[in-house]
Image (cartoon, rainbow, N blue to C red):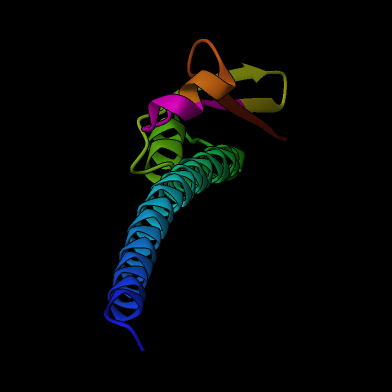
Amino acid sequence: MSRTTVVARRSAARSSRRDRAGALRREAGQALVELALVVTIMIVMALALFDIGRGVHAYLSVIQASRDGARVAMHDGATDDEVAAAANSAASPFATSVTIVRSGGLVRVTVSYDYQPITPFIGALLGGPPLHLTSTMAAN
């Protein structure tokens, strides 16, 4: 084999190794970009799920609070303060407002709570003011 052929083969081998190394670096960069996109989407989905879970928990607490208030109101001699205390206790840790309307033999207990999402993009998806949760129970 001639000297020029050996030098040409070595040069081709070196350039081939450089091409492979460059291709590996480009693929690593592409994988990093894909990872960043996927992780961002996963974090957004996890936060959205967390906020939706908080909203459902608040809604169920408001419903339970109005039921408990109506149960207390069914007892003879229950004052509005006792009914409101029972409803607020059942809605804990949420700061609710309780409205009690007595008409005839019926007592209507309405519990309200303004739900505000923690993550700003959920608030943007829901749009506008906080979600107003209300539950009403009537007791005879």
Instruction: Mark yes or no: residue 80 visible.
Output: no
Residue in the picture at 35% in, 52% down: 29
Instruction: Mark yes or no: residue 95 visible.
Output: yes
In the rendered image of this protein, does residue 2 appear above or below residue 129? below
Most extreme residue toward the bottom is 1
Residue 48, horizontal then vertical, whole percent: 49, 41
Of residues 94 and 3, the one nearer the viewer is 3
Rendered-image quadrant of the N terminus = bottom left
Q: Is residue 88 magenta?
A: no
Determine whether, in the image, residue 80 is placed left or right of residue 56.
Answer: left
Most extreme residue toward the top is 128
In the rendered image of this protein, does residue 5 appear above or below residue 73? below
In the rendered image of this protein, does residue 53 appear above or below residue 140? below
Residue 121, horizontal then vertical, whole percent: 46, 26
Rendered-image quadrant of the C terminus = top right
Determine whether, in the image, residue 61 is placed left or right of residue 67.
Answer: left
Of residues 48 and 38, the one nearer the viewer is 38
Residue 133, horizontal then vertical, whole percent: 56, 27
Residue in the picture at 45% in, 30% down: 79
Magenta residues, as a range? 109-122
Residue in the picture at 48% in, 23% down: 123
Examine the image and state in which quarter residue 28 appears: bottom left
Q: Is residue 121 magenta?
A: yes
Most extreme residue toward the front is 2
Determine whether, in the image, residue 98 is placed left or right of residue 63.
Answer: left
- Disc count in the image? 0
Residue 77, horizontal then vertical, whole percent: 50, 35
Residue in the picture at 45% in, 42% down: 44
Examine the image and state in which quarter residue 109 appears: top right
Of residues 42 and 10, the one nearer the viewer is 10
